[in-house]
Image: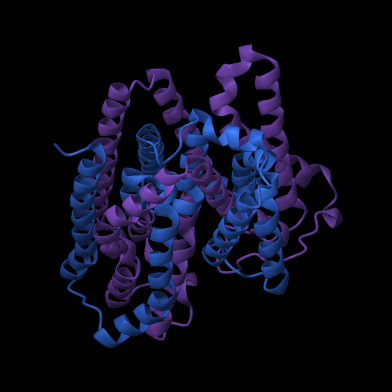
Chain colours: A blue, B purple
Amino acid sequence: MKSYFDKTHTWGRIWTVAALIIFLMMPVAFSIHLDAWPQAGYFFKGLASVAIIFYPTGIIEVISYAPLLGAAGTYLSFVTGNIANLKLPCTMSALETSGYSVSSEEGEVISTIAVAVSSIVTTIIIAIGVLLMSVTGFIREITSPDSPIYPAFQQILPCLFGAIGATYFYKHWKITIAPLVVVLCVLAFNGGTQVGVLIPISVAVALIATHIMYKKGVFGREETADNQNG
Amino acid sequence: MDFKSSPFMYAVGIIIVLFVLAQSVFFLVRAVKRGKELGISSEKMKNTALQSALFSIAPALSIVATVIVLSGALGVVLPWIRLTVIGAIQYETSSAQSALNAMGNAAGISAAITDPEQFTTVAWVMTVGSVMPLVILPFVLKKLQKGIGKAMGKNKVWADIMSAAAFIGIIIAFVGRAILGTGDKSLSTIGDGAGVLSVTGLLSSVGFMLLFSFLVKKFPKLKKIESFAMPLSMFLGMGMVLLVNYVFPAQYLIEWRY
């Protein structure tokens, strides 16, 4: 009999292929409806400058995020997008609060609930936002640069990752130092380095430094016991 | 009527939104059923759902803001669809801009598109440019996770510490940008240049979260708020940003990397 994990991968593949077909049908439907097809030259020129960055990034994202989101969480996250700023924070906080490891079956269940609920809530909020914007212009007012709460919207990411990171930094301050120093050095050299480039660098440094520290016995009994308990 | 926002376009958008919702509900129901079989308490699963919902509200509003920014050029429907599926804020603006520039449209997304051919070209580039993860996932994910599972199964203590390190690596990328990252000028909705406000948001949300953790440890009666401590800390951090923004004179609100 197939295990829960095996069935998750079977369903995940079916939904992913279905999603791929539906998404690709969107520009086809627009082109048929408007009787306007893109010229190959313009299409490939426009695609080339995007693909050169986003195709390799897409592959790196799958490899970097998959171990952290669980199986169903990964299939769902890559269909709905906004992973780094939404799905990943939701999964991280859910696992941290529940105390399960993502590699356990319980962790797989919790990460799936977190990603699915986040996808549903986000999809509904965007749909309501679009409706309100079309009808009343309300959302345009609260999120426009003239809105009194606009400065808070500009700082969502520092607030989001500060809240998630706090307990990790407190519990694992030894792990935090190496990636922080490297990321700050990269940004001091080029402040425009985007998160998509910083994440693989930061994760690689954190993993290598942590492995070396583990081998050298830097982590105390308390830290490893903390982890064993989730 | 604007061809970019016709009833047909909305119908396509609604079909895609319903698909995304159906997929999410399908996996949610499966996970809850499995959670019950594994003996995970309903309260734990409910708290996970509530925490996740609370966490999603503010970033979702910022996605709506991106839809608004792109709607000036592309109408409402195309940005709505693109940011509901696969989309990411950083990706959508640059791919729309790239497609328009390829057609010699120098104004890019700062002016409304009136030519249906330009519009469909943008739709094609945005869609085909973003599907790479969906193409490779069905082939690699199972093997990737089996490999990781094997490596992790050998030494649980090492595996858990490495898993924490991977999480911290991701968080640090965002923390680093809040401290030293320059803002992205192409995204008028995300003025994320490092400065007094970004550091205020970062430090105050860290501070609130640590305070909540301390209170829960000290007063076990407060255990119930534990699930909501993270989203609450995020909102309080945003509140502190507003407070500093309006209380401090403008000359002190330095953005050192703009």
Q: With A157 as the anchor, is B137 left or right in this view?
A: left
Residue drawn 39% across and 84% down? B102
Residue drawn 65% across and 20% down? B216
Above or below, A225 against B112 in this view is: above
Total marks in image: 0
Q: Is residue B2 visible?
A: no
Residue A23 point in image, percent of width and height: 24, 59
Q: With A61 as the anchor, is A211 left or right in this view?
A: right
Above or below, A107 against B132 in this view is: above
Above or below, B119 against B68 in this view is: below
Residue drawn 72% across and 57% down? B179
Residue B36 point in image, percent of width and height: 30, 22
Q: Is residue B212 visible?
A: yes
Between A148 and A119, the one lying in front of the other is: A119
Residue drawn 51% across and 44% down? A89
State the image quarter where residue A73 is shown.
top left
Q: With B14 as the anchor, is A123 left or right in this view?
A: right
Above or below, B64 against A170 in this view is: below
Between B122 and B216, the one lying in front of the other is: B216
The extreme top residue here reads: B221
State the image quarter where residue A52 is shown.
bottom left
User: Can you say which quadrant of the picture contains the N terminus of chain A?
Assistant: top left
Residue A131 point in image, percent of width and height: 37, 44
Residue B194 point in image, percent of width and height: 71, 59
Between A65 and B59, the one lying in front of the other is: A65
